Image: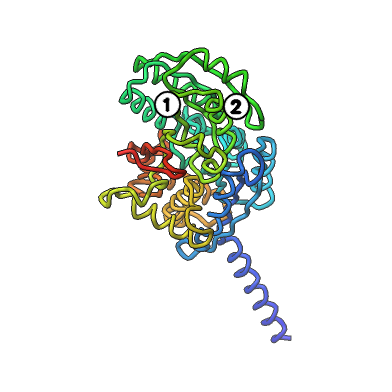
Amino acid sequence: MRIKLLQASLLAFLGIVCAAGTRAEINVGVTLSATGPAASLGIPEKNTVALLPTTIAGQKLNYIVLDDASDTTTAVKNTRKLLAENRVDLVIGSTTTPNSLAMIDVVAEGETPMISMAAGARIIDPMDGKRAWVFKTPQNDAQMATAIVQHMLDNKVRTVAYIGFADAYGEGWWNEFSKIAEARKIQIVGNERFNRADTSVTGQVLKILAARPDAVLVGGAGTPAALPQKSLKEKGYKGLMYQTHGVANADFLRVCGKDCEGTFLPAGPVLVAAQLPDSNPIKKVALDYVTKYEAMHGKGTASTFGAHAWDASLLLANAVPEALKKAQPGTPGFRQALRHALEKTTNLTGAHGVFNMSPQDHLGFDQRARVMVRIDNGTWKLVQ
């Protein structure tokens, strides 16, 4: 009888230990756009998740990856599922600005930190009670728009037309670019929109051509951003062409082809990591990511979008040891501690820049996080 009681006690003790072990694992939910119009951005992000560490500070990490199909409603549904069913400690995603904006209410309600991989400044600005739970890794559209305007001025651009997505990404770029361009005395002579799934933009392009701008900026992302540029070239436009950092991947180069030769865009340093001077502090981290990604997927396959997921992982790895001092994973206390630790990120070098976050700034990049590049012979060339 005594032996049976000891066995029962031992089994109960082992059960507690096992349960405690389960609670100690860190669950990371990822929702991204691996299919749909933003797939050329989401696929390298998904591929990068496979390269992320499975332990941090001795704690096992579980990644639960869901595809939102570039759809806002699905992104929200995925986020609710990750919080309610998988009880994640952190959400990484989504790929696009509209999806990320739609997820804010859900993570704020669940008091779970989220690291977006989308560019729109509105994802973290203006800072408020809900956005206190939201961080991001891509450069803001405002930061990149400043680089474009400066390049235009250096190249004597006096008039410009804009054509962008008819969603939060296109509107965000229009708001930031138009504000900066007008302040720097560049006249905007055209403002058009198109949808990510459109197959023709002839009407918009004809209006732009009639305005005779010195330059055109396309406020799009991924392969759909090639459509206006190909249409402008087809109809004989000879002015300067600019794109946003939302097109910085090989799929865009393949789809746009020779029609995008000579195009300028701002991008994260990782896009041209090998061309950076050795004195650049970002070069080593960026090359490390590129080497790991291309070892698995082939030379020339690494993109800025996968590097956004990589940087999210670096932020997490930096914050987890601090959060573990306060609470156990799987608890509200751990998620709160993780949020605080992310907010205190200081001098953390990523593949895209150096993070210095604060309660008011949940990105924390400075000008080191952007370079201007030119498309030259189907590749990216650093503009010196």
What colour scheme does the image use? Answer: rainbow
Labels 2 and 1 touching (C-beta < 8 A): no
Residue pictured at 55% horizontal, 46% vertical? 92
Mark 2 — residue?
A: 167
Q: Amino acid at mark 2?
A: Asp
Between the C-alphas of marks 2 and 1, the distance is 25 Å
Residue pictured at 47% horizontal, 53% vertical? 300
Q: Which residue is nearer to you in this view: 140 or 149? A: 149
Q: Splitting the image into 4 quarters, where does residue 169 fall?
A: top right
Residue extending furthest toward the right: 1
- The spot of residue 374 in percent (x, y) is 40, 37
Residue extending furthest toward the left: 279
User: Measured along the vertical axis of the image, is residue 3 above or below residue 380?
Assistant: below
Q: Residues within 10 Å of mark 1 (few under 14, many from 20)?
A: some
User: Measured along the vertical axis of the image, is residue 261 above or below residue 315?
Assistant: above
Mark 1 — residue?
A: 240
Give the foreground label among 2 and 1. 1
- The spot of residue 350 in percent (x, y) is 39, 49
Q: Which residue is nearer to you in this view: 264 or 180? A: 264
> Is 147 on the left-hand or right-hand side of 235?
left
Residue pictured at 67% horizontal, 76% vertical? 11
The disc placed on residue 3 is: none
Q: Which residue is nearer to you in this view: 341 or 44? A: 44
- The spot of residue 267 in percent (x, y) is 42, 39
Residue at disc 1, secondary structure:
strand
> Is 106 on the left-hand or right-hand side of 348?
right
Image quadrant containing the C terminus: top left
Of the image marks 2 and 1, the number of the one nearer the N terminus: 2
Residue at disc 2, secondary structure:
loop
Residue pictured at 38% horizontal, 40% vertical? 357
- The spot of residue 258 in percent (x, y) is 50, 38
Image quadrant containing the N terminus: bottom right
